[in-house]
Each structure stands twice: as structure tokens, then as C-alpha cells.
Image (cartoon, grey):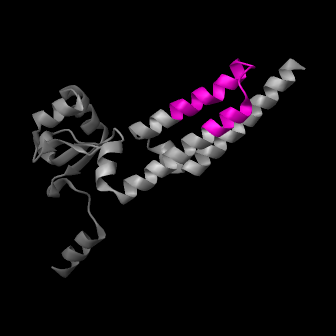
Amino acid sequence: MEYITVMFKSLAIFIIVLTGFRIMGNQAVGRLTAFDLVVVIALGALMGAPLADDSLNIYKATVAVASLVFLQRFTAYLTVKSRWFAKMAIGEPIKLIDHGKIDQKGLQHSRLTYNNLMEELRLKGITRLADVEMAFLEPEGQVSVIPIKDKQPLTHADLKEVEKK
């Protein structure tokens, strides 16, 4: 009987946390900011605690999950409404490369090594720093790269420009 109770508790908590993630939206799961990561870790802890300790009430865990989901949604709302709050909660991009030259302050601030930066560039198909107009470490942890004009992919507008000539 005890095992059946644990199975039903597991199912209930799983459904509660899954519903919470659905309410938080795809961005909270797919592109984790530091705040979202904290919420995910907390939800994981809340999910496991009632299963490991019979004295913990599943209803209290449900209230805690709902509170975290509300806090995440409220924080997401505030980041849209306030640039200051967005900067505090999410952060800002850090410039890593400017006109083909490494921004040493940005590299130090991001705590990326030269080798890590070069690996990120190679993964994006760039082998020379001179081919990069700008590169940033985004708040979600990804490196975004803007190639120099000559190395950018052709667009429909470029083709129309050629046809006019």
C-alpha cells in the first residue's frame, strides 16, 4: 500500500510541476536566464521533497510550486515593463569582439577564455577574428556573432540589388 501511495504522490507532483512549466511558457524552459534556472532548481527540490519525506504535505508542496510559478511569471512581466528590472534580473549582453578585435574587458567580465571564444566562433563557422564585426555573450549564455558585411549570407534584398545593375 505504501508503494502505491508513493506512486500516486509522484504522479500528482509530476503533473503539478509540469503544469507549472507550461504556465511559465517555453522561454522559461528553452532559454534559461539565471532567475529561471533558480526557479527550475527550486521546482526540482520541491518535487522530490514530499516523495522522500512522508511528513511533508503534498498540498504545501503544491502551494510552493504555485508560488514559484507566480513569482517567475511576475518577474517576466516586470522585465518586459522595466528596463532597469530587466537589467537587474536578466543582465545585458557583453561585447566580446569589436571590428575583428577581442574586447579584453568583455572577455574578462564574461569569464570566457580565448580558447572558449574561438571554439564558439568555430561552431558558428567562423575561423578568423577579422571576419567578425561584433560578437556578444548574451544573458542566456550563448555567443551571438555578427560577421563583417562581406561575410554575411546573401539576402533576397542583395539579389534584387544585383538584378538592378
Residue shown at 65% from the left, 39% from the top? 63
How many numbered markers are drawn?
0
Range of residues picked out in magenta: 40-64
Left or right of 106: which side holds 38?
A: right
Q: Residue 1 versus residue 139: which sits nearer the camera?
A: 1
Q: Is residue 139 visible?
A: no
Q: Is residue 121 visible to us here? A: yes
Q: Is residue 128 above or below residue 1?
A: below
The answer to whether residue 60 is above or below residue 89 is above
Quadrant in the rendering for residue 101: top left
**Residue 162 position in % (x across, y down):** 19, 74
Location of the N terminus (image quadrant): top right
Residue 115: x and y in percent read 22, 26
Query: Of all residues shown, which one is farthest toward the bottom?
Result: 164
Of 56 and 87, which appears nearest the observer?
Answer: 56
* Residue visible at 86% across and 19% down in the picture: 2
Any magenta on residue 135? no
Q: Residue at x 23, y 33 (%)?
A: 110
Q: Quadrant of residue 19?
A: top right
Query: Residue placed farthest to the right in the image?
Result: 1
Task: Residue 59: say if magenta.
Answer: yes
Q: Quadrant of residue 138?
A: top left
In this rendering, position of residue 165 left or right of residue 86? left
Residue 99: percent from the left, percent from the top?
A: 9, 48
Q: Residue 30: where, in percent of width, then height?
A: 48, 44
Which quadrant: the C terminus?
Answer: bottom left
User: Taking 157 as reference, is 91 above or below it?
Assistant: above
Task: Out of 88 and 40, give the one closest to the viewer.
Answer: 88
User: Residue 123, relative to residue 159: is it above or below?
Assistant: above
